[in-house]
Image (tube, helix red, strand yellow):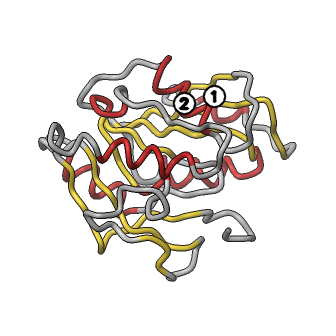
Amino acid sequence: MIHFVTPLYRYNNMKIVYSTIKNQIEDFTWHLIEGSNKIGEESIEFLFEDKRIMYYKIPTYYPWGHEQRNHFITSINCKDEDWCYFLDDDNVVTWDLINTYNEEKNTNIDLVLFSQKQGLTEKDRLWGYDDRLKLGTCDIGSFLIRYNLIKKILIPYTKYRNADGHYAAQINEYRGEHNFKFYSDRYVRYNALSLEIV
């Protein structure tokens, strides 16, 4: 099972994001965690017809989505062997991600770090090398991580945009205890549905 974790903010993107999930994989749960802000008026009621989609609403103070991700880590229980992926609401699921999940589903790997493309372009943004789990070289959407590892670490500094880099550095401290795999030639996307790729 793979759990997609989405801090829900941009309602108008949900149809496209959902399409990239449901048309590539069947064994998933998608956790939509809405904070205190939202934009867009498009209805997402159609999503709730799919029993694999869970919706939560929590109070938040910051715009980055880290509070929603920490809600998943602290309040939503999964099986230790399940995979988790932080899927932003302006992003899409790539075949590289799904293919790798299928390959690693029954292995002893606990984290996979991918390279990353800018938006829907073919420009490289970040690379999945073994020295990249640190501040400034890793994005929250760069890795696929097992629940047995994710449940050990909260995202720190939730008021800062770069909290995911600090999170990656904390994850890196578990390399002796967990098995990591790095892919420089498999990609996820960054801000795929945003007009500006910041």
Q: Position of residue 64 (x, y in %)?
A: 67, 44
Circle 2 SS class = strand
Q: Residues within 10 Å of mark 2 (few under 14, many from 20)?
A: some
Crowd tier of the residue under label 1, counting other residues whose Cα lies within 10 Å: few below 14, some 14–19, many 20 or above: few
| Residue type for callout 1 | Phe
Q: Nearer the viewer, residue 98 or 107?
A: 107
Q: Residue at x 45, y 43 (%)?
A: 167
- Seen as rendered, the residue at the extreme bottom is 123
Measure the alpha-carbon separation of dots 1 and 2. 6 Å
Task: Report which residue position mark 1 lands on.
Answer: 48
Q: Position of residue 156 (x, y in %)?
A: 52, 36
The numbered mark at residue 81 is none
Q: Relative to the observer, which residue lies in front, 1 or 143?
A: 143
| Percent position of residue 10, x then y | 75, 47
Q: Is residue 41 left or right of residue 80?
A: right
Task: Point out the image quarter for the C terminus.
Answer: bottom right
Q: Quadrant location of the N terminus?
A: top left
Residue at 46% x, 30% y: name it: 154
* Corner quadrant of residue 92: bottom right
Q: Is residue 13 above or below residue 195?
A: above
Residue 80 vs 26, above or below: the answer is: above
Q: Are discs 1 and 2 less than 8 Å apart at CB?
A: yes
Q: Position of residue 192 (x, y in %)?
A: 61, 65
Q: Look at 53% across and 29% down and name the residue there.
A: 70
Q: Which mark is residue 53?
A: 2
**Which image quadrant is residue 113 in?**
bottom left
Which residue ends up furthest to the right in the rendered image? 41
Label 1 element class: helix
